[in-house]
Each structure stands twice: as C-alpha cells, then as structure tokens.
Image: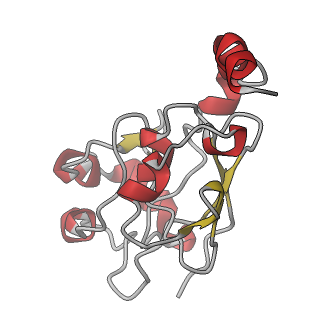
Amino acid sequence: MNRREFFKRLPNMLLENVKEEEKDLRGVIKLPYFLDEKSYQCRECEGFCQNVCEEKIIQRTEEGFPYIQFKTSGCTFCRECIKACKYGVLQENTEDKIFVSVSIVPERCFAWNKTICFSCSDVCLDAAVEFKGLFNPEILSYKCSGCGFCYVKCPASAIELKPLEVKNG
C-alpha cells in the first residue's frame, strides 16, 4: 500500500477490528502490589487506594474490588496506593509491575504502516519499545512494566493489553 492509499484507508483502519468490549478492560487488570489471597478484604474498604491515585486510573467494581483502567493515564508506580491500603491487600515487597501482556497490532500501528510515529516509545520510561529500523516497533516484554502509558498515548489504538495472572510474593 502506498502513502496515498494509506491515508485514504486510515479512518476505516482505526475503526475496524476495534470493538468497544475489547477496549473496555474494566475489572480485569489488577493493581501492582496486589495479593489475591487478601482481595476479599477490599469489600470492607472505602476505596482508599482509589482516592489517593494521582493518575486516577484505579477504579472499583460494585463489589469493591480495585482494578486499573487505562483511559487517560498510566501508572507511575508512586506506591501511594500501598500506603493508603488499610487491609494489607497491596504489599510493598512486590515489584513495580502490572501483570499484563503488552503488544502492538501491526495492522493498526502507524509505524508498521510506514508512517513515522514514536508515540509509544516517547512515553516509555522502561525503554521497552524497540524499532526494527525506522518502522516496525515491538514491545520487549522483559523490559515492560505494564504501566499503560503507551496504550493511552497511541493515536491509532494499536497497543493491546491482556491481563496475566498475578504472581504473589
């Protein structure tokens, strides 16, 4: 596809294959520092972790279970949620990592379609985005903390997040 064809098809490319339910990850992505075995205590909480989150990415289900929703920002791993947790559900001794698999969908990615774009790599503090030449970015999973900033900043909605099982301890 040449440049002219690309820009003609761009609006349709952004809309195709992006169902609303795929973009809505509510209730799926757990907080960093989260201990599954204590999650029942979240029901008794008033949402202290949600109230202190400067990025406003922590939400709660009707049952009180906290989760991350990357709509406007990502996680800075400030650890304020740990300090606010009165029930020990969030633990200091766990790593700064959100357990998600982060990947780029080449069909939606501007760079993969030969348009210069560095939106994902510009915001990545982990240096987890590697370009093969000027185009074709890839997420290096061993470097990625799952902070979500690339997801929020991608103008083509080409970043996908898939939750992984939380590893306690």
Quadrant where the image shows the N terminus: top right
In the image, is 84 to the left or to the right of 124? Answer: left
In the image, is 65 to the left or to the right of 140? Answer: left
Identify the residue shown where x is 47% and y is 33%: 62
In the image, is 133 to the left or to the right of 44? Answer: right
State whether residue 65 appears in this view: no
Identify the residue shown where x is 64% and y is 63%: 133
Numbered label tally? 0
* Residue 88 on image: x %, y %: 34, 74
Identify the residue shown where x is 71% and y is 24%: 18
* Residue 2 on image: x %, y %: 76, 26
State whether residue 43 appears in this view: yes
* Residue 103 on image: x %, y %: 68, 55
Q: In the rendered view, tell whether residue 12 sits above or below residue 118.
A: above
* Residue 110 on image: x %, y %: 61, 37
Q: Which quadrant holds residue 95? A: bottom left
In the image, is 89 to the left or to the right of 7? Answer: left
Residue, far right: 1
How is the rendered protein coloured?
secondary structure
